[in-house]
Amino acid sequence: MKKALSTLLALALAMSFALCAFAEKAPPEVPGAPKFQSFAPAPGGQSLTFDLPTVTGIAAVWDGNVDALFRGWNGPYFNAETVTVTVSFEDGRTQVLDHWSDSGYNWFWEILYDYDDATGKVTFYYWDSNFRQAYVDTLKWGDDWNWDDLYTMLPQAAVTVPADLLQAYRDSLPKVALKLGETQKAPVQEYTIYTFTPEKDGLYYFYSENYRDCDPYAYLRDVNFRYISFNHDLVDWNFGIIAELQAGKTYYLIVGGYYDYGEEVDQFDVGVRSDMRKLNGWQWLWDLFTGGLFLRRWFIYGNDLYVLPSAGNITDNMAFNGYAAFDIGYWLGGQLFGCFVF
């Protein structure tokens, strides 16, 4: 028995020496080795527990590519593909982030940024669950959450991009002038920016027609690209936008099409006209009894009824109004009976 125990003890000592020798030969930890990782859920669906490292500072470098900052006509958007953010840890190591957020069980970290278009200054902030808790600990009963106060606690870095970058980028985008009473060909699955400057104040109707195997859509925006309206199926999958516009101001109509099935015809017509009328009071009732459904084209837009003179015959008008028959009947029922028609 004693011999067996001595043999086991000798084996244990030999293994410990071997492990020590192996540890001595193990390569040293590479400076900058990743501390932030993406974690896969453990069996059972629970996230792995992870203690966040302490971040003491960050650095940011923009790659200078302006086009990469924009999506369509909006932006700029900053991310790990356009800005290299490096975090510094309390032990002196650093790490370049290939993504800007991660989370797990009771922890998260994220890169935030604040962009000033007038100066071109972009300030990046690192925050995580530890910084959040540290900020919460400073609050007293009844205090409101204040992001400005939180930001002063966070590691931050800044880069500078050209001032007024958004406006300069939008000015550089190709545009097509849209004229009253004329139509333009718009390609499917590619957005086109049309400009329109009315000569008179009034009601204007932007529309699509002659589509094939697609669903045209359009955004109407003002001179500062602020949103006015959007539509994609006012009549028979054609878009239609009705808006009050001011003379001398330039408006932007951004047009595209959903669902291209690869047919030979890959365009549709886009136009604008000013002969649409909004029917107020009893005008709609008079138009109804004088044959408006047969002689003109009716539109229900929002809570109002609009009519458009037709260049077609009665059959064309009836077919056109038939596409919107449910909306027209619903609206008329509400007007005639003072209630909704189901």
Image (spheres, rainbow, N blue to C red):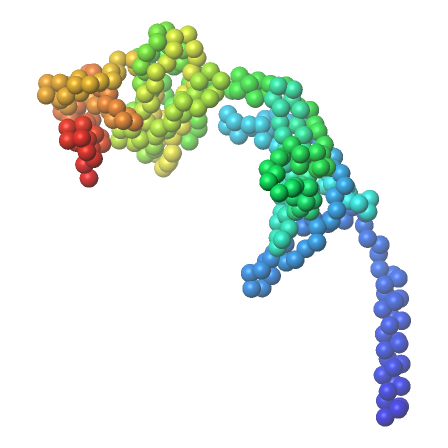
Q: Quadrant of residue 79?
A: top right
Is residue 102 something that shows in the picture?
yes
Is residue 313 something that shows in the picture?
no
Residue at coordinates 10% horizontally, 21% vertically from top-left?
A: 289
Q: Quadrant of residue 180?
A: top left
Q: Position of residue 294 (x, y in %)?
A: 13, 22
Quadrant that contains the N terminus = bottom right
Q: Position of residue 166 (x, y in %)?
A: 56, 22
Residue at coordinates 20% horizontally, 22% vertically from top-left?
A: 297
Q: Quadrant of residue 139?
A: top right
Vertically, is 276 above or below 5? above
Quadrant that contains the C terminus = top left
Residue at coordinates 32% horizontally, 27% vertically from top-left?
A: 239
Tell which of 208 and 282 is nearer to you. Answer: 282
Q: Is residue 164 shown left or right of residue 327? A: right
Q: Number of labelled discs?
A: 0
Q: Is residue 240 shown left or right of residue 195? A: left
Residue at coordinates 27% horizontally, 26% vertically from top-left?
A: 303
Q: Position of residue 317 (x, y in %)?
A: 17, 23
